[in-house]
Amino acid sequence: MTAPTINGTRYPQPLEDLLPAARALDLPDGEVFPSRNRLMREFRIGAPRAGELLALLKTTPAAPPADTTEAATPDPAPAPAVPEPAPPVEPDPTPAPEITPPEPIEQVAPVSRPDTPAPPAPARSAVVWPVVLLALPAFVAIWSGWVGLGGLTGFGIVHPLPGIWDSFSINSAITLPIGVETYGAYALYVWLSGRVPERARRFAKWSALGSLAIGALGQVAYHLLEAAGVTSAPWWITTAVACLPVAVLGMGAALAHLVRTHD
């Protein structure tokens, strides 16, 4: 038994080559695909290959006829429609109504509840010019008192630059009011400012009070000695007055150090 001649050869053909011949078989009315037995009989193939060929017939669409000469050309794309120009719109002879802007609504201040505390008004800083007026007479009295007490305790004209500027002289008694009273005012400011560490504030407080007390005692001592007609102060007053510049220097250096300390 030999296979039928397909495509000019009698050797077993691939299923793809048998597929066109299977489609060309004449089928009885009502049948769409040939049976497996007919495929086995027509192409001299076994049952497995006939089953595969039948499956290909059912799943592979039929190719278009070979005598089609003219290829289907796609329809030309329709030309884009050109919109017709809109007719000109005639202007409306009636004028547009004039729109008046609304009047601004006056803002009403919110009314707070009776039990709501009102915010405190900003505090105005106190003027300081009366302090200058008060300090002028006090400065004259304190300056004269300290200079006078310095004269009674050995302070006087000195030449601080001997051999360099022999004609330059200064009354050393002015060091008392400048040192004692200036330190007292500065320490008082540091104490009341509240912007320094606690140690510096505490030291400034007690040293300011001590400086003001020493200044008051110096004024009392000078006026008592001047009223008694004393031309030379006792030794213990002279000793205390002579130590004042050194004490002021030490307290000033200590306060400056504490102010810069953030412990």
Image (spheres, helix red, strand yellow):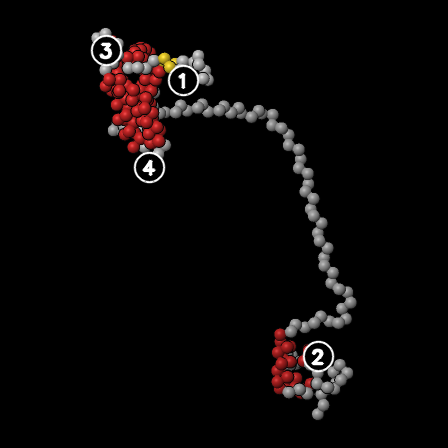
Where is residue 190 shown, x and y percent of the image? 32, 26
Callout 3: SS:
helix
C-alpha separation, residue under disc 1 versus residue under disc 2: 133 Å
| Residue holding disc 3 | 225
> Are the residues flagged by discs 3 and 1 in contact, CB closer than 8 Å?
no
| Residue holding disc 1 | 160
Name the amino acid type tagged 2: Asp
Image quarter of residue 10: bottom right
Disc number lying in front (1 or 2): 1
Front-most of 71 and 103? 103
Position of residue 245 relative to residue 84, above or below, is above
Q: Quadrant of the C terminus?
A: top left
- Give the mark, 3 or 1, whose residue is nearer the N terminus: 1
C-alpha separation, residue under disc 3 versus residue under disc 1: 29 Å
Callout 1: SS:
loop
| Residue holding disc 4 | 263
Residue at the (26%, 26%) spot, across then down: 206
| Residue holding disc 2 | 17
C-alpha separation, residue under disc 2 versus residue under disc 4: 103 Å
Where is residue 9 shown, x and y percent of the image? 76, 84
Residue at the (28%, 15%) spot, across then down: 153
